[in-house]
């Protein structure tokens, strides 16, 4: 047995040098197959779909970029797009500022029971978006919700947060609530990578708390800011769950085109306008990717200038 | 800078440093273990209250009868404590449809998230330890795919699946959740450091086949990374809403998230049957398992987040 083994192994090895090159593909294959089927193919299909139009006369005809041109002039789409841009510009800075504050507070070691804060603030991230929206929908209610309770108990007159004036703020609040702790933890993880000796030498150099935050901690949080900002771009531009669920509570203030994703969803369901829905989905996908990419590049470039 | 220069032994190395550190201890302690700040505690407690109040509202509401939910103060108990009753009603309402949704969710999580983790592990190991034709292209494509949000894919995937008649069944939900580019990325980074090439080479010399090496050696070494990716995939699949909503029209295939929204729609329709106590209790039943998983597996999501924060 001992003498046979090397003899058998030798030809296998010679053979292996050509087949071994493909062994890696063997491990990759299952992932690759599903990846192509559920990621590449749908995108290709949607792009293809978006280039056609269904016309009353002539059926489905090739339309080139007509759907895209139409979308850019479509007031319903522009309204939805403007709304998520506004959402991004207002909600994201507030959320990231609170997250950064919480991360710095956790890292400062000045909190008692910091684990309690860390876990409690992160907890909302585990709550399904649907339930977050349902729950906040109950809380917002002026009749029997918490807002209504506060109004009747303390004689306040808090506004109806689901009225057209406040509904975007109501949604911004749900997103902030859900992702604040997640962003905090990403930033906190980045802060933990700072070698403790650095703080020691800063203290020896006589740097105060705010100086340390400004010169050591905030720069250390830069990659975390970039990644949380990228996720926030995606979250804002692809906003769907919150508005779609609150719509059942407030159908008059939240239209079918409240966000671009809702518009695409309703176009393909209620309207059966698959070609146009595909064009909207593609535009939003590309736009999200471009903005996310710009954020990343800007983050890296500013980091290098430092 | 004054303290170290007064003690030249500092530069000599590790050992002589100890007395210096010792001498500086009060100062060092005050920095790395500073005194508690009441102001910071107050501010953080406000944030904590903000994060927990809606959940408290939900838990308390689940213990009330429907009239009490609609009439009493939301953040305190009122009337009879009917949590058990509410749970029974939730589970039996409409022929036990909630249980059906729960089973569906479990199937989607086990097959979808479990499968996604397995595929990502196989592929991540393949990328980390093998050279093969087209590897760089694969890598670029996967990295690019991380940036594609699942919600952006939902409509295109629905359009394609409906063209080939794959909608309105469990596979419409499971197939898209089988792909986790971020999971693949995590496993790849983990596999490059946690699986030594020498070990694999040694196993090959001993005559072990690639599959056997993977099952007996690699899988064990990758276990912590595997669990992290599994955790993230489980949470994502459990909370998935847009994709099943768009894919499924038959309530028999709904997961919990879509089912609960259907109850909410039904309750808020003009003339609809008010079942707020069921929505509230159903929400609690949906949240509790995932929160428990989170709390029990804390250290795993922490490592996933660290990888995420270093990624950019």
Image (cartoon, coloured by chain):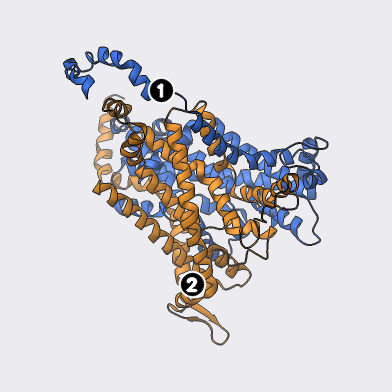
Question: Which chain comes out orange in the rendered image?
Answer: A
Q: Position of residue B121 (x, y in %)?
A: 43, 41
Which secondary structure, mark 2? helix
- Left or right? Give the position of A105 relative to B71: left
- Left or right? Give the position of A209 relative to B300: left
- Position of residue B210 relative to residue A93, above or below, is above
Q: Residue furthest bottom?
A: A57
Question: Which chain comes out blue in the rendered image?
Answer: B
The subunit letter for the residue under badge 2 reads: A
User: How many numbered marks are there?
Assistant: 2
Same chain, marks 2 and 1? Answer: no
Residue sitting at 25 percent across and 46 percent down? A306
Residue at image mark 1: B33
Binning the other alpha carbons within 10 Å of mark 2 as few (below 14), some (14 to 19) or many (20 upward) gives many
Marking on residue A49: 2
Binning the other alpha carbons within 10 Å of mark 1 as few (below 14), some (14 to 19) or many (20 upward) gives few
Q: Nearer the viewer, residue B139 or B256?
A: B256
Q: Position of residue B276 (x, y in %)?
A: 76, 49
Residue A45 shows in the view = no
Q: Nearer the viewer, residue B280 or B149?
A: B280
């Amino acid at each position: 047995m001992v003498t046979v083994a090397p003899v058998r192994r030798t030809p296998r090895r010679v053979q292996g040098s050509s087949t071994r090159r493909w062994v890696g593909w063997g491990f990759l294959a299952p992932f690759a197959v599903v990846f192509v089927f559920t990621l590449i193919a749908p995108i290709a299909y949607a792009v293809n779909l978006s280039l056609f139009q269904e016309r009353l006369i002539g059926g489905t005809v090739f339309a080139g970029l007509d759907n895209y041109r139409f979308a850019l002039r479509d007031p319903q789409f522009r309204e939805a797009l403007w709304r998520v841009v506004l959402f991004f510009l207002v909600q994201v800075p507030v959320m990231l500022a609170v997250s950064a504050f919480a991360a710095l507070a956790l890292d400062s070691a000045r909190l008692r029971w910091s684990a309690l804060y860390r876990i409690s603030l992160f907890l909302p991230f585990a709550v399904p978006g649907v339930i977050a929206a349902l729950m906040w929908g109950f809380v917002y209610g002026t009749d029997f919700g918490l807002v209504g309770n506060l109004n009747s108990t303390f004689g306040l007159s808090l506004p109806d947060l689901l009225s057209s004036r406040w509904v975007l703020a109501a949604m911004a609040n749900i997103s902030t609530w859900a992702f604040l702790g997640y962003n905090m933890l990403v930033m906190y993880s980045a802060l933990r990578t700072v070698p403790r000796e650095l703080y020691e030498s800063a203290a020896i150099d006589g740097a105060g708390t705010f100086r340390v935050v400004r010169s050591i901690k905030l720069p250390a949080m830069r990659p975390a800011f970039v990644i949380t900002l990228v996720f926030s771009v995606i979250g804002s531009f692809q906003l769907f769950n919150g508005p779609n669920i609150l719509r059942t509570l407030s159908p008059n203030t939240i239209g079918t085109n409240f966000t671009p994703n809702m518009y695409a969803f309703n176009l393909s369901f209620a309207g059966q306008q698959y070609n146009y829905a595909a064009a909207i989905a593609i535009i939003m996908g590309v736009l999200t990717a471009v903005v996310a990419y710009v954020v990343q590049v800007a983050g890296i470039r500013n980091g290098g200038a430092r | 800078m004054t303290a170290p220069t007064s003690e030249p032994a500092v530069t000599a190395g590790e050992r002589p440093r100890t007395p210096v550190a010792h001498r500086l201890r009060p100062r060092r302690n005050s920095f790395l273990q500073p005194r508690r700040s009441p102001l910071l505690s107050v501010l953080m407690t406000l944030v904590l209250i903000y994060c927990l109040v809606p959940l408290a509202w939900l838990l308390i509401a689940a213990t009330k009868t429907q009239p009490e939910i609609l009439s009493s103060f939301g953040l305190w108990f009122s009337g009879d404590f009917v949590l058990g009753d509410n749970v029974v009603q939730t589970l039996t309402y409409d022929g036990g449809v909630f249980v059906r949704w729960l089973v569906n969710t479990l199937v989607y999580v086990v097959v979808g998230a479990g499968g996604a983790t397995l595929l990502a592990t196989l592929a991540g190991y393949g990328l980390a330890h093998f050279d093969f034709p087209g590897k760089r292209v694969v890598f670029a494509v996967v990295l690019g795919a991380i940036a594609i949000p699942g919600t952006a894919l939902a409509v295109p995937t629905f359009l394609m699946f409906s063209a080939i008649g794959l909608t309105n069944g469990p596979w419409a939900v499971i197939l898209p959740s089988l792909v986790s580019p971020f999971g693949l990325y995590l496993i790849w980074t983990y596999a490059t450091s946690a699986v030594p090439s020498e070990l694999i080479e040694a196993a090959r010399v001993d005559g072990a086949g690639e599959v056997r090496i993977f099952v007996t050696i690699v899988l064990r070494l990758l276990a912590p990374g595997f669990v992290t990716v599994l955790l993230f995939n489980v949470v994502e699949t459990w909370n998935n809403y847009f994709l099943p909503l768009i894919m499924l029209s038959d309530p028999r295939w709904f997961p919990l998230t879509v089912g609960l929204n259907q109850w909410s729609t039904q309750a808020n329709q003009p003339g609809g049957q008010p079942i707020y106590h069921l929505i509230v209790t159903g929400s609690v039943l949906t949240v509790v398992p995932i929160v428990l998983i989170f709390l029990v597996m804390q250290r795993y999501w922490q490592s996933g987040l660290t990888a995420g924060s270093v990624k950019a």
